[in-house]
Amino acid sequence: MSLRHGLLGLLAGEPGSGYDLTRRFEDTLGSIWPAKHPQIYGELTRLASEGLIEAEAEGPRRRKEYRITDAGLTELRRWLTDVDVDHTMRLDPVLRSLFFWLMSPAELEQHLTEEAEFYREKAQLYRGYAEAKDRGDFGDNPQTRSLRVTVEAAIRLYDSLADWAEWAKTVPPATPK
Amino acid sequence: MSLRHGLLGLLAGEPGSGYDLTRRFEDTLGSIWPAKHPQIYGELTRLASEGLIEAEAEGPRRRKEYRITDAGLTELRRWLTDVDVDHTMRLDPVLRSLFFWLMSPAELEQHLTEEAEFYREKAQLYRGYAEAKDRGDFGDNPQTRSLRVTVEAAIRLYDSLADWAEWAKTVPPATPK
DNA sequence: CATAGACATGTAAAGAGAGACATGTTGTTG
DNA sequence: CAACAACATGTCTCTCTTTACATGTCTATG
């Protein structure tokens, strides 16, 4: 249940509406923790009912801006320090690799080329963010520093996967006689 | 819904019971696609009712050994070649990094040390499998070659994460004056 | 022969997440 | 002023996944 704490964390950074948070999730977390708006609105309602966040009066278009409460900040810190990290990965592309032997060499070649390209582009995208940050484009404060660390993970993961796909292309499919 | 095709793929390699598949998922796929037995039994029943797999008569302890049917193999191949790869990642440890600014330097230091250790051990574990395979311990056929590719992904991913955690320790937490 | 551990299969309930449906507002542009 | 895009919030249903509960068999060991 990391969505809960993801929302809490984003709100610890700055207040926002469900709409804002949906966009922030998509922009900064899209690759590492996707979340759709129905789930976010639901979770915000639950968090508010538990007093971990609170909303001021409604704004222009029924806009409800939430901010984190002291209880919420306490819960967030508790999660960060006391709750075990969930190391679960669920990677469809890697699962598929277990079944590469069922694909023809041509199909596999094409598949791996596309995968490598996809990952390399993603890595480039995040590298762009990282460079902008390092140039000072986003200012410098503890929050943007953390974001920089997160972005670094994305770069490294996507680069690894791109390297892996390229490496996999060099593995001969059948037993060499 | 990769579990479905994961099961189909494992059964394409060799027939097995729900119990077998649960273990195989845990052993070879535990890190990249976890699945618990209730889910596996349920999915096997569904696959059987759709004719993608079939069971022979029950063995010793009500054991039902399933094998893939031609329809199942067709469906598996269709998935591998025609269905878009799902690139979704959901990584709690990376999500957490976005909120590192809420942790004290000491807490963060400890957290990152533990993370790095965890990933490095995992990488080592898979490196061990890879070396055994490369030594020829598991023989050589298309299936074990694919497994070798999958293992390589695990090694690279875990090493990246370990490197990342170590790198993160070198990032100063606050704006240097 | 008792008993423990591995083998073996399931059901039920609850939570997480995705996709479709539904509604209405504000601001910009032609 | 019409129309569209972006803003904004929700519900409902279905699927996927986990956890707890439940049951029974076979084999090796003391």
Image (cartoon, coloured by chain):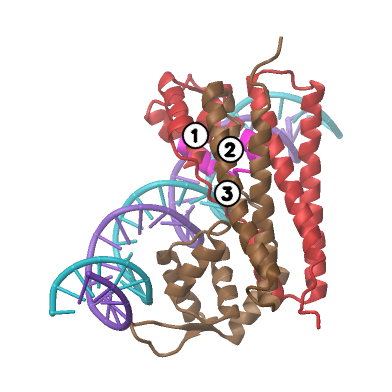
Chain colours: A brown, B red, C purple, D cyan
| Prevalent SS, magenta region | helix
Residue B29 covered by magenta stretch: yes
Image-quadrant location for residue D28: top right
Check if mark 3 and mark 1 are on a common chain: no
Disc 2: which chain? A
Q: Which residue is mark 2?
A: A95
Looking at the rendered structure, the kind of residue marked 2 is Leu
Q: Amino acid at mark 1?
A: His
Subunit that carries the residue with mark 3: A
Query: Residue under mark 1: which chain is it in?
Result: B
SS assignment at label 2:
helix
Please identify the quarter of the rendering in which residue C26 is found. bottom left
Instruction: Tell which circle, 3 or 2, labels the residue nearer the N-terminal end.
Output: 2
Mark 3 neighbour density, 10 Å: few (under 14) some (14–19) many (20 or more):
some
Q: Which residues are magenta?
A: B24-43
Q: Position of residue B61 (x, y in %)?
A: 58, 27
- Determine contact: label 2, label 1, CB under 8 Å: yes
The mark lying in front, picked from 3 and 2, is 3
Along the line of sight, the residue nearer the viewer: A177 or B175: B175
Disc 2 versus disc 1: nearer the observer:
2
Closest to the camera, between mark 3 and mark 1, is 3
The residue at which mark 3 appears reads as A121
The residue type indicated by label 3 comes to: Glu
Whether residue B171 is visible here, answered yes or no, is yes
State the quadrant of the C terminus of chain A: top right
The Cα atoms of the two marked residues, 3 and 2, are separated by: 21 Å
The image's mark for residue B5 is 1
Please tell me how crowded label 2 is: few (under 14), some (14-19), or many (20+) other residues with Cα within 10 Å. many
Query: Vertical placement of B107 versus A115: above or below?
Result: below
Q: In the figure, is residue A89 to the left or right of B77?
A: right
